Image (tube, grey):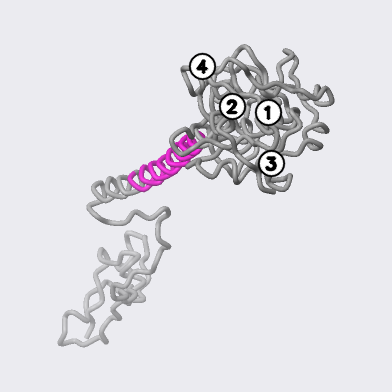
Amino acid sequence: MIFYVSWLVLAAASAVVAQTESANCTDSGFNWMFNSKGQSPCNVAELLAGQCDPQGFNIPPLPTSDVYFGPSSAQANNCQCTSIFYSLLSACAACQDRSWLDWTAYAQNCSQVFLTVYWEPIPADTSVPHWAYLNVSATNGSFSVSAAENAGGPESSAVASATGSASTSKSTSGSSHSSKTNAGAIAGGVVGGVVGATLIAALAFFWYMKRNNNTQRVANTSAQTGGREILSSPPPSTWSTSPAQPMYQPTLPKPYNPDDPSTFPPAREQLTPMNQMLTGTTYNADPNWGKTGQYTGVPEV
């Protein structure tokens, strides 16, 4: 469909301080688009865009056969390059029985777009209907009146910080404005990295201390034993390797030889029990033994 653009449509995409008349819904069938404060989507869109323009932002009524264009490259900002503002502006055209552009054509001059996210804080004097947060990519890339009318959920009101992420690949719900932001994701990644690095460092330190203690224990043991290894139990007993000592063998008496005094029988007083055993001579304890004709110990010829 070809739309004819007037100067009024071009002026609607920028801040117009001198403009006093603002667009409003003319079809009562679209009263469901109003928020709980009685503000039309045109009024809400003006307040959101004004967050990025200190002079304020005005959306004029839309003449027949005209459309609201997206911002120029010089006017593109976080407030207008978001699908939230696009949906409100398209709803403003719809409730005036006018047509609107699809999302791609609207945001062609935006260097960065925010899908389902309004980056700036919501003004305290307004609230954003839940349907403005619908993902236009899921409705053929354009604002859908039927999808907006059937969308349920609470409005989004002013919060202390931005309401979502600048990522165009993430969808957020406008019901709570508690969407995760890039800052939150980065912070979570940093915290996770720090925790992981701390665990790795702790494990490395524990391993180093254990290894160092084992090394110190071995060094102390070596110093105490002169470098010798200490066995936990004594080695088994072994037999001596010294040469075996021969058993005692008694010297046998020599045969009697009259010419060899060493072969003479011992005298009476020499007949000790050991000599008796060695010589085979019987000792008699009788003091007269040897005096009555017995052997006196003197060699006999």
**Which comes before the other along the chain, label 2 or label 1?**
2
Q: Position of residue 61 (x, y in %)?
A: 65, 25
Q: Amino acid at mark 1?
A: Gly
- Which of marks 3 and 1 precedes in the sequence? 3
First in sequence: mark 1 vs mark 4: 4
What amino acid is labelled 3 in the image? Val
Q: CA distance from mark 2 to mark 1?
A: 8 Å
For label 3, the residue is 136
Residue receiving disc 1 = 174
- For the record, the magenta segment spans 186-212
Q: Are marks 2 and 1 in contact (CB under 8 Å)?
A: yes
In the depicted structure, whether residue 39 falls above or below residue 98: above
Query: Label 4: how many residues lie within 10 Å, few (<14), some (14-19) or many (20+)?
Result: few
* Screen quadrant of the C terminus: bottom left
Q: Is residue 130 left or right of residue 211?
A: right
Q: Where 57 sits versus 185, above or below?
A: above
Q: Evaluate if marks 1 and 3 touch, with contact meaning CB atoms under 8 Å apart.
A: no
Query: For mark 2, what is the residue?
Result: 163
Please say whether residue 203 is one of the residues in the magenta stretch. yes
> SS at mark 3?
helix
Pick whichever of labels 2 and 3 is earlier in the sequence: 3
10 Å neighbourhood of mark 2: few (<14), some, or many (≥20)?
many
